[in-house]
Image (tube, rainbow, N blue to C red):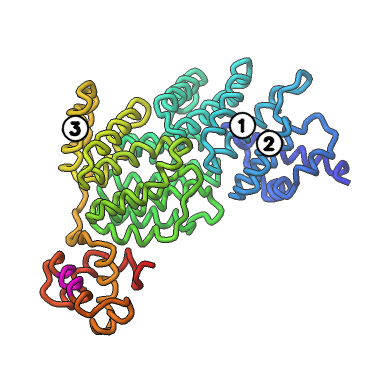
Amino acid sequence: MLEAYSDSLFEAAHVLVDSSLRNSEQPGLRELELLRTLSFADVRRLAHPQRKLLLAGMLMARIRADDNIAAFELAEVTAERGFNRLLTPDPASEFHALEAALAEAYLATGYSTKAVLHAHRLLESVEEGASPEWELRTYGICAAAHAIDGDHRTAQSFLDRVARLKTQQGWPSDQVEFMDAIAEIVIAFTSMDGARIRLLRDATTRLPEREPTALSLVHLIQALALFADGDVTGTLAGSAIVAHGSDLPTGPSFIRMCALAIEAIVLIQRGTPAQALALLHDVPALHDHYVCFDVVRASAFILLGDYRAALQVTDGCMRERATHSRWMMPATLLRRAIANMRLGNPEEAATDGVDALDFVESVSPQLGLIMLPTRDLLSLGVRIFAEQPRLLPRLGKLQHDIRRLPKFITPSFPLPSLSPRERIIAIQLRGDKSYAELAADLHVSPSTVKSQANAVAKKLGAHTREEAVERLEQSGFYTIYGETPAA
């Protein structure tokens, strides 16, 4: 049955694959839907030499629809069954199409290491001979894969290749392709390079005309340009639109997750870390932490003064360190270093700080430095130098980077440092129950409840129960810890 439709299927695949090349026509909904609903089993039944092209089209259709689960499953079975092997009779163009689609599928689903693998398989083949348009696409994919994988030096080298190729071909230097833009914004935001972000904003204005799924990316870049200009309100509004899919419901999930993290970062920067924690409440960890929300949560806890929570929330990052996003790992380590330093664990603080500096060669530390108190960062630098004097040059650069950080507002009411039992009492203080009733609920004496309530009030500088509750509300305590006691 499918054989009868093979011509239209391959025509649709051709259109979709070619649409990713410079200045090509975009496919219609018919082509996308035709390929998106086709299964791997269907492809196996088609005895056609252009099977690679068809698989490439199927992968791209799933990516365009943001059907990431289906895209990942198809990518996995394609690679496992060896359907992406380059066989002697096969045209190289079909191999290019499939390897590019595999790399993009793994990027879309956050498997950057696998994306790098397929990007370099594509690169090796393209370097043996391909059109300039395919070279451009390949360099962009390689740049994006390395940027998200946390090797920004290599990513930049591929962006440099993109620039040279455009010069050689006489193509406009200010026309940016989708994958190039991904790499550019990851590098620019990580290094807090406002000038680069603004240039990218101007260069991507018309990108959605050539690549409709780029709309949310363009809006995110515009929001980050506002962040670079110090427009907190505009950044919040822009990132929220992207994060919640208001502009493009089927836009790339990766872009939406980045926008959600940006929204939380800006809430912290403006002095409302409790709101950031509320925004990320119930947001699950992504595999390999390819966008690491726990880093943002740890930042909020540090500014609120809950250093133990900052460590606890990043424990999962350390358990998954082998596979954790290298792009986000320096920020994770810096937060753990400061939390350990504040908790009186100088050796652990120095170890985490040294480990964070080991990433400086491949990833700018700027993104990892924002949302952290300058005094704590400088104290950490002194601690690291005492342990590792050889790191003085890197520490000097770090000190320079700290001076360039965007300013943030310190929360008016930091969280009080409460013991687990005091935290339970603090939560209960907001209710109407008397100390005797609370004691009965908690199976302790009224004097114990009163003693702990007094301890909470003293830490808050409050004189009455009502004043203590008011200060807990102002600090965001109830936003973070809820209305009911922990189990």
Name the residue carrying label 2: 56
**Rendered residue at 16%/33% (across/down):** 382
Q: Amino acid at mark 2?
A: Ala
Give above or below for 218 relative to 415. above
Q: What residue range appears in magenta?
A: 451-457
Disc number for residue 120: none
Answer few, some or many: residues within 10 Å of disc 3's Cα (few below 14, many 20 plus, some between 14 and 19).
Answer: some
Q: Amino acid at mark 3?
A: Gln
Percent x, y for residue 307?
26, 51
Q: Amino acid at mark 1?
A: Ala
Percent x, y for residue 286?
49, 48
**Rendered residue at 43%/22% (across/down):** 157
Q: For the residue labelled by badge 3, is the local secondary structure a helix, a strand or a loop?
A: helix
> Disc 2 and disc 3: Cα gap in Å?
47 Å
Disc number for residue 399: 3
Is label 2 or label 3 in front?
A: 3
Q: Would residue 453 be counted in the magenta stretch?
A: yes
Q: Earlier in the sequence, mark 3 or mark 1?
A: 1
User: Quick check: can you spot residue 409?
Assistant: yes
Q: Quadrant of residue 337?
A: top left
Q: Earlier in the sequence, mark 2 or mark 3?
A: 2
Q: For the residue labelled by badge 1, is the local secondary structure a helix, a strand or a loop?
A: helix
Q: Are marks 1 and 2 in contact (CB under 8 Å)?
A: yes
Q: Would residue 443 be counted in the magenta stretch?
A: no
Q: Quadrant of residue 482?
A: bottom left
Name the residue carrying label 1: 100
Foreground residue, 118 or 140? 118
Q: Earlier in the sequence, mark 1 or mark 2?
A: 2
